[in-house]
Amino acid sequence: KLYKLSALVYSLAFPLIKKHLHNWKPHLNPAHGVDVVLPWKSLLDNNESVIAHSYGESQSSSDQYGLYHRLLYDLVLPKIRSSLSTEWNPRDHESVIKLFEAWREAIPEYMKQNILQTLVLPKLSKEVDNWNPRTDTVPIHQWLHPWLPTLGLKRMEPLWTPIRHKLSLCLQAWHPSDRSALAMLRPWKDVFEPPQMEAMLVRCILPKLELEMKKFVVNPQQQNLDTIQCVLRWQGMIPEHHLVVLFQNEFFPKWLKVLQAWLSNSPNYDEIARWYLNWKQLLEPLVKNKMIQGELNRALAMMNEALSGEPVTIPPMQPVAPQFSTPPNVYTGIDNKRRETPVHQAPRDRYQQLSLKEAIQQLAEEKHILCKLTNKRWN
């Protein structure tokens, strides 16, 4: 180090490595050259910049990390940059991920991060802009999600907004009988932030399910279950409380009216019991919810009335607080216009620690009101 022998080593290594990497295409042969470059690291990565500084010698910015890093800057990085910027197809994730894996010990972390930020992310972003979910045969998650361990979720977040926008446009013509939407959205469930995923489902999926449920006919003699099965397929994707409200509003009123008419006309109670149990089994994904249990209990109360000889009436719905696995945090919004009448104010001790958005959400939950996003501003 004292006699700067590393400079001599660098002069020997440079032509050898340059010749070895002359025809190298990193995206086609990721591991090529690692075995040639790496052995020089221990000889060149010797903190020469620190030694030079101790003798009062100035160091240029290109030399401040030592000769090994200079070797990478001069020979390895130009090859990688050229390959990724001009020849690499960003849908081919395997080759570049293998490149980083193969050169993990040879290329320092800051160089890797620079390549990711200046080369990989811009090309991925451009490819996302060119992606068309209606015509592309390869789902976007297949070539984008493998980058998550390397790039990290936070760094890839800017890509999610155009993806959600394109998915939303694609879903405008979707019908609930088409299973492709579920297959397209399911891989994003744990990638998008829960509020963003929930907002898209409520905006693009739930209204179409609601429209189909409005058309649904309860017919004990010849029951078509296609609509119910289409809705239940979304259990696990759409938060449970939305599906519960959907069934409460669009299914159970019709179902209980049919049951009331059946019980009022000399019924066969064995048939009714089987009908009830079959529906309970079909709704098994939701039956543990207290609000669904309340609807089923209303049916049992009607059966008990019929058995006792009393006129069969539909019992009033008992208010039960919905059981949320995670509280919804996106479906509330307020108009920008100032309201003419004062908004009901909840007791301060219950809401004073909440933001305006959270306070409205909590109040809506207590009143069993479904809140939907009206705009992107909360305050």
Image (cartoon, helix red, strand yellow):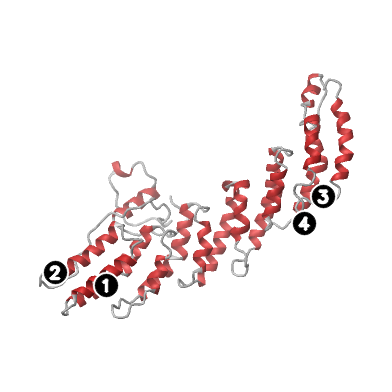
Any part of residue 342 in sight:
no
Q: Which residue is mark 2?
A: 305
The x and y percentages for residue 59 are 81, 28
Q: Secondary structure at mark 3?
A: loop
Residue at position x 40%, y 67% in the image: 231
Residue type indicated by callout 4: Glu
Q: Which residue is mark 3?
A: 24
* Dot 1 or dot 3, earlier in sequence: 3
* Dot 4 or dot 2, earlier in sequence: 4
Q: Are the two marked residues, 1 and 4, in contact with CB atoms closer than 8 angstroms?
A: no
The CA distance from mark 1 to mark 4 is 63 Å
Residue type indicated by callout 2: Glu
Q: Secondary structure at mark 1?
A: helix
The numbered mark at residue 306 is none
* Dot 2 or dot 1, earlier in sequence: 1
The residue carrying pointer 2 sits among few (fewer than 14), some (14 to 19) or many (20 or more) residues within 10 Å by Cα, namely: some
The CA distance from mark 2 to mark 3 is 84 Å
Q: Which residue is mark 1?
A: 275
In the rendered view of the protein, which quadrant contains the N terminus?
top right
* Dot 3 or dot 4, earlier in sequence: 3
* Dot 1 or dot 4, earlier in sequence: 4
Q: Image check: 57 left or right of 344?
A: right
